[in-house]
Image (cartoon, helix red, strand yellow):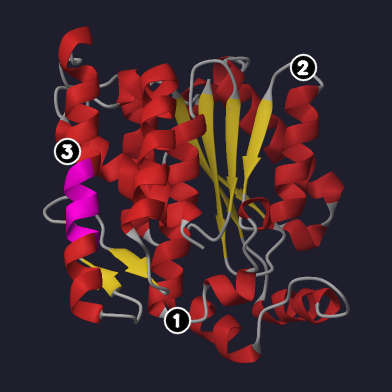
Amino acid sequence: MALLVISGQPCSGKSTVAAELTQMLVGKGLEVIIIDEPGLSMTRNQSYRDTVSEKNTRGKLKSAVERSISKRHFIILDSLNNIKGYRYELWCIARAAGTRCCVVHCAVPKEQAWAWNEERAQGKDAYSAEVFEDLWRRYEEPDARQRWDAPLFRLAPDQGKDTMQPVLQGVVESLTEEAGPRQRSVVAKQLQPTQATTNAPLSATNLLHEIDGGAQDVIGRICAAQELAGSSAAGRVQMGEEVDALQLNRPVTLAELRRHKRVFLKMSTQSLASRLPDRQSARRMFVNYLREHLD
């Protein structure tokens, strides 16, 4: 149905907003899936401690969105979503799926965000001072003039639930087409796939062959890198044009890769065929699969 991207500085109340929106949508009988770092077994501080970790984190979150998005339920991406280029990629995923998309920006004073982070440190997943400062400095605020940031709703979670309620209601109305005449300008439109995001589907006869070929290309690159690394981890393995590199932090055997390939092929032919229009797409999806399962 829709992708709802929550964006904000660290500890700015994003998860509180996600929970409120989930409750409101579920109250309307709608199915909601929340995607966040803890849900993918990642701690927030470790996920953003350096450039490599941050890139891998964004990749896992994006892959989870790609796997889950459909016209049957709402996806709430509860994360920093702090890079405008990344938000554009998420918007493209929504467009390719033919669903709605909107952005909710949570903004609080830095002092309040740090205070909430200190409270979280009493037993939850808190940011270190270094990671907090780095993320705060690099945050790229959403801009409603950009199509991938629109419609844009701004919230101040530090002002309390009563203050947020009208905005939250506006978000729900935007995504469910319940906005009144005065709010029609902020209704999230149904995005339409374009030729750039939609390819002719593979025929039944060559579907498995193309998926297998794409996965085998990835395995070949990993094996070549692993051979050079010897008994050590292969590190960053380049996957070619339009496919993100794969970071390997331990040695990986061919037998293990083949096992993952068998699972991926079974999963692909059963549920992912419509989103694997060519070998390049199969390669990208297999790399994302390995990124999540080669722990």
Mark 2 crowdedness (10 Å alpha carbons): few <14, some 14-19, many ≥20:
few
Locate residue 100, reporting x and y percent: 46, 25
Locate residue 214, reporting x and y percent: 19, 38
Where is mark 3, residue-wise? 280
Q: Main secondary structure of the magenta part?
A: helix
- Against 124, residue 273 (above or below) is above
Q: Give the residue type at disc 3.
A: Gln
- Against 248, residue 290 (above or below) is above
The reply to whether residue 198 is in sight is no
Please tell me whether mark 1 or mark 2 is closer to you in this view.
1
Q: Which residues are magenta?
A: 216-222
- Place residue 228 in its image quadrant: bottom left
- Tell me which label, 1 or 2, sits earlier in the chain: 2
On the rendered structure, is 293 left or right of 176?
A: left
Where is mark 2, residue-wise? 28
Residue at 41 percent across and 44 percent down: it is 259
Per the model, the C-alpha gap separating discs 1 and 2 is: 40 Å
Q: Give the residue type at disc 2.
A: Lys
Judging from the image, what secondary structure is the residue with disc 2 in? loop
Residue at 77 percent across and 16 percent down: it is 28
In this orientation, which residue lies closer to the viewer: 109 or 176?
Answer: 176
